Amino acid sequence: MPLGIGFIGSGFNTRFHIQGWRGVRDADVLGVWSPNARNAASAARLARECDVGDARPYKNIAAMVADPAIDAIWLCGPNHSRIENVEEVVDTIRRGKGTLKGIACEKPLARNVAEAKAVQRMVESVGLKTGYLENQLFSPHVEAGRALLWARGAATTGRPYLARAAEEHSGPHGPWFWRGNLQGGGVLNDMMCHSAFVVRHLLTRPGESYDTVRPVRVTGHIASLKWTRPKYARRLRATMGTAVDYARTPSEDFASLTIEFETADGHRVIGEASTSWSFVGAGLRLSAELLGPEYSMKWNSLDSGLQLFFSREVTGRAGEDLVEKQNAEQGVMPVVPQEYIAYGYTDEDRHFVRVFQGKEEPKLTFADGVEVVKMLMTAYASAEQGRTLAFPARGIDKFVPAVARGTWKP
């Protein structure tokens, strides 16, 4: 029988999953819950329009979990609601009201290590299978390039020694992303979870555990390059509301990270990652590179193979019909068709459906999500101290970044 899937959260991320579900078999999107009932109804309607399930909105999480039609939950709500949402899921199951097979959680697993471990502990206490949703690892370009380089280049000339990954755009959609106390930080916490894991993924031989490429030293750097400038701080406040005040409580809009790994076969290899909310370009740009002794690969999501041109005479309202985080509607514009496939959502969701059906072993679990949060917090600690730190850094389980505490001054 197909799995019945319920989504916690109804925003931008959930809608990417729903669109990508058109390529997922053996599972139907049947439910959506959101604190905003109108948004939940809209997301459920999108699922029906995409013909991926007869979805309906639920009044609360407990009702959705308790419905026998719902077999698995996709956690896609805001970071600051993660603990509360998981508590309601787990409490419903403990009361004997739910029969879930698994739960998958969007990145990051939580805002800091203490919260991430709490999420993992709660879910494991009721025996659920877990999946950590890191879509970029499932991107067709990343997976194809990685497989070919390891099969041809590394097999004959030696393992790769340098991986790079970046995610860059002009800034998040919703106000809570910009608020360090709610989101848990700035762009590092929001997007470095992708890039830091991508470099480790590329450096790991396909089929082997990530433990074979172990992080040992971390150097992080954060900065505010654009959004604390008075003009842009005022623009941000006008767009996102008075609670987003980068003149007084900013978050970083740029972050870089260098990770030194020790491999199981005795090599030292390097991962370089960067993320930005201050990128000026057509829209969201994802990129990755992998280099070895006699080979290399590169990927840039904006090199899509499809471009459109609109002259000054072509006018219309702003939108995101060409690429996510689209910044213009005129000139030469790259188009990323079916972004949910290009970014890895479809293959990711197909995999975790099969995991919860018992057909595959999970590539990523909540344990991997905890490890990623440790990496992010070590990067913040390194940036605050201005030095390279051993991984995991001492006291990282209790660490909360200055950005999240509202005390960071760029």
Image (cartoon, rainbow, N blue to C red):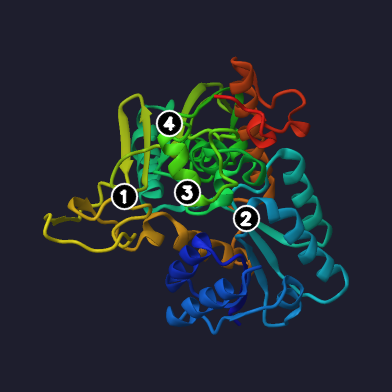
Kindly give the residue lying farthest to the bottom in the view shown: 54
Label 4 CA crowd tier, 10 Å (few <14, some 14–19, many 20+)? many
Question: Which residue, given by chain and number where applicable, does mark 2 sit on?
Answer: 78
Q: Nearer the viewer, mark 4 or mark 2?
A: 2
The mark that comes first in sequence, 4 or 2, is: 2
Asked where in the image residue 3 lies, by quadrant, the reply is bottom right
In which quadrant is the C terminus drawn? top right
Q: Nearer the viewer, residue 247 or 189?
A: 247
Asked if labels 3 and 2 touch by Cβ distance under 8 angstroms, the answer is: no
Q: What secondary structure is found at the residue carrying circle 4?
A: strand
Tag 3 or tag 1, which sits nearer the N-term? 3
Mark 2: amino acid: Pro
User: Which residue: 82% across, 62% down?
Assistant: 126
Counting residues from the start of the chain, the first of labels 1 and 4 encountered is: 4
Q: Secondary structure at mark 3?
A: helix
Say what secondary structure mark 2 lies in: loop
Q: The residue under label 1 is which amino acid type? A: Asn
Left or right: residue 143 versus residue 262 is left
Res 205 visible: yes
Residue 119 versus residue 225 in the image, above or below:
below
The residue at which mark 3 appears reads as 238
396 horizontally vs 164: left or right: right
Query: Looking at the picture, which amino acid does disc 4 mark?
Result: Ala
- The residue that mark 4 highlights is 163
Q: Nearer the viewer, residue 276 or 123?
A: 276
